[in-house]
Amino acid sequence: MQKTFKFKMKKKVDWFNILLVLVILVALIFLVLQNTLFNNVFSITGHATETSTLSNVTIAKYLSIALCTNLSDGILFGDVIELPATDINATHNFDGASTGSTMCVNVSEDANTPIDFCTKANAHLTSVDDDTIGLANETYHNSTETNAGTPGRDTNSTSLTTSYVKSGYAVAAGGLNYYRFWLDVPASQPSGNYNNTVYFKGVTTTLDCN
Amino acid sequence: MMKKKVIKSLKIFSLAFALMLIILPFVSAGVGISWDKETSLIPENTKTCLTYKVYNPWPEDSYVQIELSEELMQIVSYIESEAKFVPKQTSSENAIPVEFCFKTPKIYKEDCLLFNKIICRQDCTEEMKIYEGEVEVLEVGEQDVKGGAGGSATAISVSAPLRIKVQCVAHARNYSVVYILIALIALVLLIINLLKKRKQKK
């Protein structure tokens, strides 16, 4: 009788353990299904068969620019002796062929997209003693060709700003964009050496200057 | 007679050279950018790297630096900060790759049953988040005005557009945590029972 009872007890405990093992197995199966089949099961829409072939195209763009030497040397206005002074020419405004400008930006022939140019200055022309000539006094104009009158000091000439502004549109590979710069200095300007940095950025024609 | 010829040749040569100086716009070091991808679709909360290329087809060596616009900088995780040397006459075909990496943030809201984190589903009904900006390659040479005179120093750069679209990945409610919890509880009970059984045997 005692033997039978022991046998029954043993069997009861075994069934519980088997149940626990089954629970673990089912939970693991559901876990696997959750992260495999369940994720995809609703995307199956029918029994259509199809074959496919890859269609591929890569569109590459490249552009490169460089400053002409006279522009990379800086935009120089020389010594100003008399104040006020208006429309002071940058030193390379008229020293090219046919008295054209020699301040230019080159677009490389190794480019496959036309380029727009953006121009800005980092700050007012500033002396070491923190006196400034306002950027509104530093003006420029640009053109893809140059001669005595082009780029001209006319209504199209613009003051530099600290944000990029377009200053040349769709200049083709191998092309040039010429610049002329002028400076006005008011009568009350303290003497000194004034500097800033002017940036030229080349972008694709679809892109804003930012 | 001979002397005259030499002088004449020298004059012609000098004239031609002077003309060349005037006509040919001599160039400084330049900078170029090459790219074949303007948009990248990246799942949220994912790290990915993109490669643009720099080149310099001009006759002077240059050093360049890569910068990303403000909006793209919000998600950038790696960008080369040191100036990169680009030898002269490097054509677009031999352009030098420059890599930068992004880590997209977790943007889209999930519908979760527990603690806003567990047993979640993603419907992707929100509008796609797009980070839009540009990759700018700056030439980092000297920026002083030559001769120490007053005026403006000059600098150049080129840029290419880049859009990072953050992809929302829709998924059904995930009960994985529940299954793991049930399996763990069952395992613990099983171990307790087995230990008890062993003790009883002793």
Image (tube, rainbow, N blue to C red):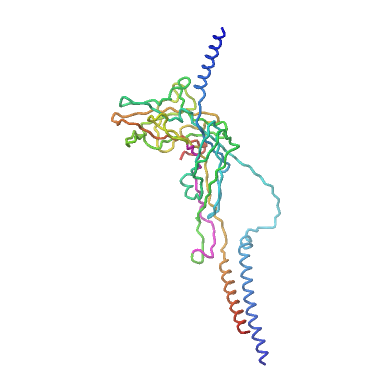
Closer to the camera in the image, B18 or A159 = B18
- Asked if the magenta segment contains residue A111, the reply would be no
Magenta-drawn stretch, dominant element (helix, strand or loop): strand
Task: Work out whether B115 lies above or below B47.
Answer: below
Q: Is residue A90 above or below residue A43?
A: above
Quadrant of the drawing holding the C terminus of chain B: bottom right
Task: Choose top left, top right, bottom left or bottom right for residue A189.
Answer: top left
The quadrant the N terminus of chain B occupies is: top right
The x and y percentages for residue A131 are 32, 35
Who is closer to the viewer here, A101 or A50?
A: A101
Residue at 58% from the left image edge and 66% from the top image edge:
B176
As drawn, the residue found furthest toward the front would be: B3
**Residue B97 in sight:** yes
Instruction: Judge left or right: residue B195 versus residue A70.
Output: right
As drawn, which residue projects farthest toward the left?
A188
Seen at 38% across and 29% down, the residue is B149
* A127 sits left or right of A105 in the view: left
Which sits in the foreground, B10 or B12?
B10
In this view, A187 is above or below B189: above
Magenta span includes B128: yes
Q: Magenta stretch?
A: B116-140
